[in-house]
Amino acid sequence: MDQSTPLAAGPLEERPVIGFRHVDLVYDDQVALKDVTFTVANGEFLCLTGPSGAGKSSILRLIAMDALPSRGEVIVRGMLASRMNRRKVPRLRREIGFVFQDFRLLDDRSVEDNVAFAQLVVGVRSAQIKRNVMRVLTQVGLWGKRHRLPRQLSGGEQQRVAIARAMVNSPKILLADEPTGNLDPVTAQEIIDLLFRINDAGTCVVFSTHDHGIVHVFGERVMIVQDGRLVSDEKRRTQVDRSANLADHMYRGQSAPKEFQHA
Amino acid sequence: MLERTRTAYLLRESFAGFHRRKLTTGVTILIMGASLLVLAVLTLVTLNLGHALETARAGIDMRVFLRDDLAPARLAELQPRLVVIPGVARTSFISPEMALRELELNLGADADLLEMVGENPLPPSYHLTLTAEARNLEAVRGIRDELAVWPEVAEIIFHQDWIDALETWTVRFRLASLVVGLVVFVAAVFVISNTVKLTMAASARVIQIQKLVGATNAFIRTPYLMEGALQGLLAGSLAMGSLLGAGFLLGDRLGGIVFFAPGQIVGFVAFCVLLGLIGSWSAMRKYLTMQSDL
């Protein structure tokens, strides 16, 4: 890895969208991350993997400024975590979308209200909210089910609502924490395909998973985290292979690569 | 139905706690209302006692006895000099004859005793009425010290013990009111704070999502502050309404009690709203960090 990459210099669009330099994260004397250094470029699709408890979620928390590094530098969209005014955190989070394994939808609100919620809290005008909600729900194929409650949807549909909510504010970064963990393989592939399309449109995607099959088939740039350390960071294939890989995976099912078999 | 505006959302959320936890909110308003009723009664007693003390203070005056060998012209000259002394509102001259008549009236059936005295022994004097600001021990002593050096003055009388006692009781009662008021204040803040904490705990998921999508703390706080303020408003209105109702029912049996003026009623309810806001604010401290617990 090029450790001399300028994290906070030059025009914003040319800088790495995410930068970690010698980052440690310690919670109550427990070391969650140790000397982690990497950068993510604009529009990149990063697959973050490793066993449970390895530190994947800690990396996502640091990117979201939900935790501050105990040592080292974290820069997201040109903002240095350690020097950032905490009042600016909400503004940064509007440029980040989040998708979780458990969807985290509001159970008592309809699909469209769940998506609109993300716009409402940041003060978008109502007419604009309606247009944006229609756009993203159409993209994820749920406009026809906009009046339903989350419990009236399948797991895959709920995850698509969560993705629509994450995308409605047009974020520059999408953080997906085990988004396929609760889904069957076919639905998981649909979700990953959706994430690919989002990435194709220019959004940087950080996809965290411990599912070896998904990493093997879809991972373009794969970072492996183990015991809080970054043990591998490699680019495996290019975007043009995506469709072929997706079709191949849907046909053959999942298989685990050797490097994960001990995990 | 898609929520139209941010304001509509905030208003809806402000009432959501009432709707979702009717019993808890109802009990909170009742407990807080009862505490505030105690505070309102105490304030009313303080108000009436203050009124009584003020009436009593109006009786604080001073009698300046003059040498009995002064010529009438010299006695008249003193009046303009007395009136300009700071703290003196009015003066009235009491001649020896007037003083004798006053004494006769005071003695009543025993007035015959005065015949044994023969010649009128009473000196001329001035009765000084003091301004409201001068009706305290320090000011009265100041006026006394100023007059004591006048060669025309023989003796000055004022009721020092009575003024002392009045001041002591005023201070004691104000202190007692302050202590009880503080206890009620803390209790009301505690009750509201806990109710809002329950609301926030029940809304933890919504708050988490709000933080994730970039809501500011101000946006997250607003509905909870409004909920606390609304609870304060209802509890304050309940307390004041109960007191007004009791006043209406008891009517004349309360004698000449002084009741709250409209401005004071509004002030009391506004204070209750402030209590509600403080209660909510203290409940939210935990949630005011930017952590979303991903």
Image: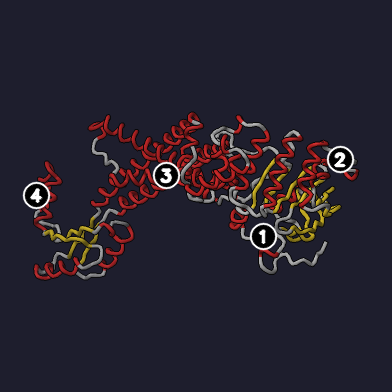
- Which of labels 3 and 1 is toward the front? 1
SS at mark 4 in the image? helix
Taking the image as shown, residue B216 lies to the left or right of residue A245, namely left
CA separation, marks 2 and 3?
62 Å
Residue at x 77%, y 47% (from the top left corner): A242
Q: CA distance from mark 3 to mark 1?
A: 42 Å
Q: Residue at x 74, y 33 (%)?
A: A184
2 or 1: tag closer to the N-terminus:
1
Element marked by disc 3: helix
Instruction: Give the x, y percent position of residue B133.
Output: 28, 59
Alpha carbon of mark 3 to alpha carbon of mark 4: how far? 70 Å
* x then y, percent, for residue A144: 56, 35
Q: Which mark is residue A256?
A: 2
In 3D space, how far apart are the residues under numbered discs 2 and 4 (Cα atoms)? 129 Å
State which mark lies toward you, 3 or 4. 3
Query: Which of these two is toward me, B250 or B108?
Result: B250
Q: Position of residue B68 (x, y in %)?
A: 14, 64
- Badge 3 local density, few (<14 within 10 Å), some, or many (20+)? many
Q: As shown in the figure, which amino acid type bears the numbered disc 1? A: Arg
